[in-house]
Image: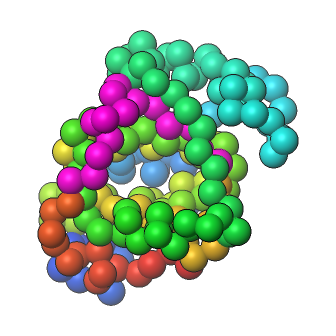
Amino acid sequence: MSAITVYADDNPQQVLLHSEEGDRITEVLAGIGVNFERWQAATEVTAQMSGDEIIAAYAQDIDRLKRSGGYVTVDVVNMSPDHPQKDEFRQKFLAEHTHSEDEVRFFVAGEGMFYLHVGGKVYQVLCCKDDLISVPANTTHWFDMGPAPRFSAIRLFNDPAGWVANFTGSAIAREFPLFE
């Protein structure tokens, strides 16, 4: 189930807010400029579908986002517990970083945890199947897919080269609970 937990950035033991209500998650994230939506596929989506078939199932929402956000590239990424580089990929994004363009992810299946460091707070957002999150460019954040990742996500880019992680050097991510 999708959830948001907000902490003061200097006290990861004190929960300032927690909610599993979609409208509340949307409202809280909108307050820091982050878009959060729930999508439904136009057709049934199965694990056997190709990336192109998955994209076609969500074409209406994807096209709307492409028009409003100027996104030009769309792909599907899959991660499973038996992926040979799962540990390397997990570690890569566990440190606080930014991107020069929006990080837009729609979870077709599975789940992952985004941590957004904004305005003296850390917003921990559990994204699950049917969740879209759009983290604005230059927002400090990190992502944890967990030790046994299992997800399929649609990614939208203005320019794939802009999606390079720019690490802040901060140790803050090590202070907050991992996604287990």
User: Quarter holding the C terminus?
Assistant: bottom right
The residue at the point 84 percent across, 32 percent down is 44
Q: Position of residue 123 (x, y in %)?
A: 34, 62
Asked which quadrant contains residue 48, the reply is top right
Asked which quadrant contains residue 55, the reply is top right
Most extreme residue toward the front is 84
Q: Is residue 162 shown in magenta?
A: yes
Q: Is residue 24 above or below residue 11?
A: above
The residue at the point 37 percent across, 63 percent down is 93
Q: Judge left or right: residue 71 versus residue 155.
A: left
Most extreme residue toward the top is 67
The residue at the point 41 percent across, 71 percent down is 91
User: Quarter holding the N terminus?
Assistant: bottom right
User: Which region is colored magenta?
Assistant: 152-166
Front residue of this view, candidates 136 and 92: 92
Q: Position of residue 5 (x, y in %)?
A: 41, 67
Q: Is residue 63 above or below residue 48?
A: above
Q: Is residue 15 above or below residue 49?
A: below
Q: Is residue 139 shown in magenta?
A: no
Q: Position of residue 166 (x, y in %)?
A: 21, 53
* Residue 99 in view of the camera: yes
Asked which quadrant contains residue 39, the reply is top right
Q: Judge left or right: residue 93 versus residue 148.
A: left
* Residue 37 in view of the camera: no
Q: Position of residue 115 (x, y in %)?
A: 36, 63
